[in-house]
Image (spheres, rainbow, N blue to C red):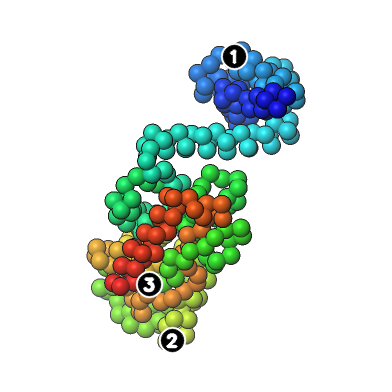
Amino acid sequence: MNDMRQRRFLPSLKLLMAFDAVVRLRSVTAAAAELNLTQSTVSRLILTLEEQLGKELFTRERRRLIPNSAALSYQRDVARALDIIQRSSMSVVTNPDGGSLSLAVLPTFATRWLGPNLGAFLSAYPGVGVNMSTRIGRFNFSEETFDASIYYGQSDWEGARHMKLFDERATACVSLEIAASRDLQRLSDLADLPMLHLESRPTFWADWFKGQDEPPVQAGGMLMDQFSMMIQAAISGLGIALLPDYLAQIEIKEGRLVPVMRQAVKVGAAYWLVWPSDKDEYPPLVALRNWLSEDLLAQQAAG
């Protein structure tokens, strides 16, 4: 009896993939094209799934399949399960010895800080693979396939373990042309220059002003959603960029931007590695934590 119940509630991948595609695309025709099947085959697979579960998942209207509330809820779980199976299968093929780590990261942080340093981690732990996807906001680990996330904020991600990477420090930068044409020694010298703002850092400039020895100035400017956009705007002379110091130093070193006023001012929150408690002992995650604390962050602190 138990075996029969297991089979009933474990539909085949073919049935689940057809169901997921129909609900996601809201079309049997589109699902058939995606799966390289005929429409009649997809419809038959959906009917077979409903018969196996003993539950109607769609309303039939003029040859259309309209998912009901049960189908919509079921599809969210099925899609997540299919994603987990796909990621795990890819891990077996690409990293059969050490496993893989699925990591959610901030876009610019990934490309400008983590990415350039990741080769050292892969060399230190050659059996481990890292799969990265960008995420700006927080999410529920139980509803995603990520093993961990790197985010900016406080140590208050509900239901997650935290490891502090480093505090945010900011440096204001301008283009070479602006730096060469103006004397920017005091905050008052910045008053008529547009200040570039980031949507996710509403208090960034206010915090930076607190780190200077002079009262703040008020100036308008452009609002952006990515530091990469802000950097390009500053290089083009559109205003003053306030950047995390790890980004600013790259642009300064490579001669694209010039710092103004006091550099590396502590502002706002910090960068954190977070993960669900049930991943505490997951070997690829343990390896990443060890590498971050014992190697990369220690080297940067010494530097």
Q: Residue 25, image x and y in percent?
A: 59, 29
- Residue carrying label 3: 171
Q: Is residue 177 left or right of residue 130?
A: left
**Residue carrying label 2:** 214
Please report whichever mark, 1 or 2, sits nearer to the chain's N-terminal start: 1
Residue identifier under label 1: 41
Q: Please, what secondary structure does the residue beneath circle 3 have?
A: strand
Q: In the picture shown, does residue 93 fall above or below 149? A: above
Point out residue 168 in the picture as x, y percentages from the top left corner. Answer: 44, 70
N-term-proximal mark, 3 vs 2: 3
Q: Residue at x 41, y 35 (%)?
A: 92
Within 10 angstroms of label 3, few (less than 14), some, or many (20 or more) residues? Answer: many
- Residue 67 has which mark? none
Q: Amino acid at mark 3?
A: Thr
Q: Nearer the viewer, residue 231 or 64?
A: 64
Q: Is residue 157 left or right of residue 207?
A: right
- For discs 3 and 1, the disc positioned in front in the rendered view: 1
